[in-house]
Image (cartoon, rainbow, N blue to C red):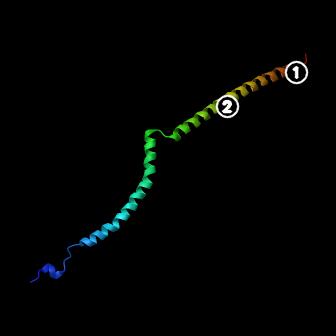
Amino acid sequence: MATAAALQGVNDGPSAGQLLAIIGGAIPIMGILGYTAVKILGPITQAVARRIGGGGGEGDALRGEVDELRAGMDELRHQLLDTQERLDFTERLLARQRAPEQLPGG
């Protein structure tokens, strides 16, 4: 007599050949996903590492540019102060020349 399981057609799971076919199809997909993850996450992790380390060529270049701009601003401030002093001097000279003319007849 046959067992009840054999009569009902109980499936014991996929065969060895079916498992190999599933794994064989999953390997290329996993490879593509891994490659994509490395290509996407690689530059991100490098940028984070540079940020944490506080280094990088860009930081030095930006620092140099900021220092150059500061020096330019200091020069402009100096020129503006010089121009303001000259303007004040000119206004004082003009005020002295007008004062005698404005006094009532003497």
The residue beneath circle 2 is 76
Quadrant housing the N terminus: bottom left
Q: Is residue 57 above or below residue 102?
A: below
Question: In which quarter of the view is residue 21 placed?
Answer: bottom left
Q: Earlier in the sequence, mark 2 or mark 1?
A: 2
In this image, 83 relative to 4: left or right? right
Image coords of residue 10 (percent x, y): 19, 77
For the residues labelled 2 and 1, say whether their Cβ atoms are less than 8 Å apart: no
Compute the Cα span from label 2 to label 1: 38 Å
The residue beneath circle 1 is 101
Identify residue type, mark 1: Glu
Residue drawn 45% across and 42% down?
50
Identify residue type, mark 2: Leu
Between residue 27 and residue 36, name the one nearer to us. Answer: 27
Question: In which quarter of the view is residue 38 placed?
Answer: bottom left
Question: In which quarter of the view is residue 35 placed?
Answer: bottom left
In this image, 81 relative to 3: left or right? right
The tally of labels here is 2
Between residue 78 and residue 30, name the one nearer to us. Answer: 30
Q: Residues within 10 Å of mark 2 (few under 14, many from 20)?
A: few
Between residue 23 and residue 63, name the one nearer to us. Answer: 23
Residue drawn 86% across and 22% down?
102
- Badge 1 element: helix
Residue drawn 75% across and 25% down?
86
Residue drawn 38% across and 61% down?
31
- Badge 2 element: helix
